[in-house]
Image (cartoon, rainbow, N blue to C red):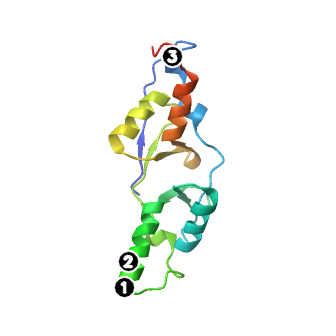
Amino acid sequence: MGIKSYIGKRAKPTKGTAQNIKVSDYMTRNLITFRPEQTVLEVMDTLIKKKISGGPVVNEKYELIGIISEGDCMKQISESRYYNHPMEDIKVEQHMIRNVDTIDGDMNVFDAANKFLESRHRRFPIIQDGKLVGQISQRDVLKAALQLKGRNWK
């Protein structure tokens, strides 16, 4: 499978500084996930109703197998129109991104910010013991920065 994990620095942080703010402190744990056998139309409906831009695709063991986003759905709309195919039968597994980058929940949240800048991803899933345990978004990193306002970045 094409899942790449980024592991953060393991230096001992100084209490009360930005260094001890971990991804796991800010990640979303209660995720909206998708299954490979769902239709793209179901995904589109969920994205709109839940006001999210995408989400992880998991198997029955809650192992991460892909990501599906608004952009993936848009590609499907375009292809369906071009080839005059109905969208009702198109499954998530046909259009999800399988090469997924993940990051370690113990990574410093500001090191994660650099990963966002380098990759241009909007979200990173977090895997622990082979299972999806959370996801961190760019917005989560912004929340962490707001909590630090006025403190040292050391």
Distance from the alpha carbon under mark 1 to that under mark 2: 6 Å
Task: Name the amino acid type tagged 3.
Answer: Pro
Distance from the alpha carbon under mark 1 to that under mark 3: 55 Å
In the picture, measured across the screen, residue 77 lies left or right of residue 89, that is: left
Task: Name the amino acid type tagged 2.
Answer: Glu
Query: Which residue is drawn at the image coordinates 41% and 58% (left, top)?
Result: 1
In the picture, measured across the screen, residue 142 lies left or right of residue 84, that is: right
Say which quadrant the C terminus sits in: top left
The numbered mark at residue 83 is 1
Dot 2: element = helix
**Can residue 39 be seen in the rendering of this structure?**
no
Contact, CB < 8 Å: mark 1 with mark 2?
A: yes
Task: Name the amino acid type tagged 1.
Answer: Tyr
Contact, CB < 8 Å: mark 1 with mark 3?
A: no
The quadrant holding residue 84 is bottom left
Q: Is residue 35 depicted above or below 120 in this figure? A: below
Mark 2 crowdedness (10 Å alpha carbons): few <14, some 14-19, many ≥20: few
**Can residue 95 be seen in the rendering of this structure?**
yes
Q: Is residue 142 depicted above or below 93 in this figure? A: above
Query: Which residue is drawn at the image coordinates 49% and 19% (left, top)?
Result: 19
In depth, the one of 77 and 29 nearer the eye is 77
